[in-house]
Image (cartoon, helix red, strand yellow):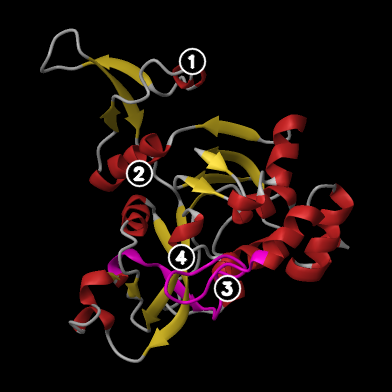
Amino acid sequence: MATGDSGPMIDLDALAARIEDGCRLAIPPDYSGVAMAATRALIARRARNLDLICCPTSGLQADLLIGADCLRMIETAAVSLGEFGPAPRFVKAVRDGAIAIRDATCPAIHAGLQAAEKGVPFLPLRGIIGSDLLAHRDDWRLIDNPYEPGDKLVAVPAIAPDVALFHAPLGDRHGNLWIGRRRELVVMAHAAKATLATVEAVFDGDLLADERWAAGVLPALYVTAVAHAPRGAWPLALSGQYAADADHLDAYRRAARDDDGFARYLARHVAPRVAA
């Protein structure tokens, strides 16, 4: 549920304000352009009761939102800091039962998004048949293949987020975003009711009209609002722009092991008024 009716280019705080409490928020994996600056702004405004859809996994972004008490539910195939180990706030929330978790797989989440993108109620999958996930997901239905009697499929319902949020390398003032080969962002934007993005740089011109860029562009038709946020994925990487800040991620892992350490991290790096 994105609010407001201004043009596509807005400031970062205004972008975060468009993500209403209680909405279904879709975010990309760490390798696809994570809107970390917008996430910090979202925490600073004390967002609450978000249902987070990881498309299909997350790391630091989800862990921060969990630790800052922004989430009501998370649907994901995994939450991890990768080479830096488990995501500490996620692990604590699971152990404490502090958050609702809808366990999923990468193909299932992609299928749900693709169903919403195509405007159909579900898409069928095979790979999760026989797994214990089916016992915990009453919204995944075992059905008969109508073209082959006796053949079973799993119907995964459409996932239609209220908002898709990500960080792109380049955008223009028309609202077009250059995302390169990150086509999963296209699926997210097609599936969502609104798409909010931060961009590393602003292109002077029309990306969609420029043959050098057009093939990798998500058109403004699918983009609700854009904010300019240089190094907006930090401390995560942005492909072709900068690497992940390993020292920072390791410091986060150590700080976020306990409540006091996480509060100090928020006070220093995210939103001092939240941790106060």
Residue at 17%, 82% in the rendered image: 211
**Pointer 2: what residue?**
113
Q: Residue at x 58, y 56 (%)?
A: 20
Marking on residue 14: 3
Q: Nearer the viewer, mark 2 or mark 4?
A: 2
Q: Secondary structure at mark 3?
A: helix
79 with respect to 208 (left or right): right
Which of labels 4 and 1 is toward the front?
1
Q: Marks 3 and 2, how far apart in space?
A: 26 Å
**Does residue 17 show up?**
no
User: What residue does disc 4 label?
Assistant: 196
- The answer for how far apart the CA atoms under marks 4 and 1 are is 35 Å
Residue 178 x, y percent position in the rendering: 33, 74
Q: Is residue 146 left or right of residue 262?
A: left
User: Dot 1 lies on which element?
Assistant: helix
Q: Quadrant of residue 147?
A: top left
Q: CA distance from mark 2 to mark 4?
A: 17 Å
Structural distance between the alpha carbons of marks 3 and 1: 42 Å
The residue tagged 1 is: 135
Task: Return the residue nearer the eye: 263 or 119.
Answer: 263
Which mark sits nearer the N-terminus, 2 or 1? 2
- N-term-proximal mark, 3 vs 1: 3
Give whichever of discs 4 and 1 has the lower sequence position.
1
Task: Say above or below: 118 vs 19.
Answer: above
- Residue 192 position (above or below residue 216): above
Q: Pointer 4 and pointer 3: residues touching (CB < 8 Å)?
A: no
The amino acid sitting under disc 2 is Leu
* Badge 4 element: strand
How crowded pointer 4 is (Cα within 10 Å; few <14, some 14-19, many 20+) is rated as: many
Residue 130 vs 271, above or below: the answer is: above
Q: Residues within 10 Å of mark 2 (few under 14, many from 20)?
A: many
User: What secondary structure is the magenta-colored segment mainly?
Assistant: loop
